[in-house]
Image: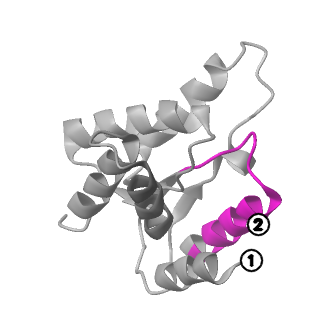
Amino acid sequence: MDAQLEGYLLEAEKENLEHQRIFMICPVRGATEEEKEFLRAYKKVLQSRGAQVHYPEEDTIQQDPTGGYGICTQNGQRIINSTQVRVYWTKKSGGSLYDLGTAFNEHLRSKKPIRLINRDLVKQIKDEEGKSKSFEHVLLRLDSLAKSY
């Protein structure tokens, strides 16, 4: 695991997360082995700090005879029932877009905090693109807002 990912784990180890129910938005299909290793470790750190954590790779039933409707339903309910959402953002995850939309709606409805796990990497994506509108801009704004709650 690279040093930047290890730094994200160290940040999480400083948090008091008792009574928190956290949903992790992250890639499942197409996630690299390094990303999966990191996300499993991140989940364990959050749990060690007192949180209940839903990590879709492990906690969402991925065999879905409805073609994805069941997965979206499971994740949507978990996002609604969470106290906060953590996002590991990459551009390669279509499912993350759906989950982010659900989480954003919850943020609008109840100011549910949405925090970035990999903020520095998202900044790099945003800077490389140079676009005025992007999901990366939205995520960075949500992450900043979450720190004020």
Mark 2 burial class by Cα count in 10 Å: few <14, some 14-19, many 20+: few
Q: Quickly name the residue at label 1.
A: 1
**Crowding at mark 1 (Cα within 10 Å: few <14, some 14-19, many 20+):** few
Residue 64: % across, % down: 76, 22
Q: Chief secondary structure of the magenta span? A: helix
Please tell me whether residue 111 is drawn above or below residue 42 in the rendered image. Answer: above
Indicate the amino acid at tag 1: Met
Residue 85 position in % (x across, y down)? 42, 53
Task: Name the residue rendered at 72%, 15% in the picture.
Answer: 67
The magenta span reads 25-45
Label 1 vs 2, first from the N-terminus: 1
Residue 23 falls left or right of residue 101: right
How are the colours assigned in the image? Answer: one colour
Q: Are marks 1 and 2 in contact (CB under 8 Å)?
A: yes
Where does the image place residue 66, in percent across and percent down from the top left?
Answer: 72, 12
Magenta stretch: includes residue 1:
no
Q: Total number of numbered labels?
A: 2
Question: Splitting the image into 4 quarters, where does residue 61 fall?
Answer: top right
Q: Residue furthest left?
A: 148
Choose between 51 and 86: the one closer to the eye.
86
- The residue closer to the viewer here, 89 or 129, is 129
Residue 60 spot, x, y in % from top left: 68, 39
Quick one: SS at disc 1? loop
The quadrant in which residue 32 appears is: bottom right
Q: Is residue 72 above or below residue 55?
A: above
Kindly identify the amino acid type of the residue bearing the numbered disc 2: Glu
Q: Quadrant of the N terminus?
A: bottom right
Residue that numbered label 2 is attached to: 37
**Measuring 75% from the left and 59% from the top, which residue is drawn there?**
36
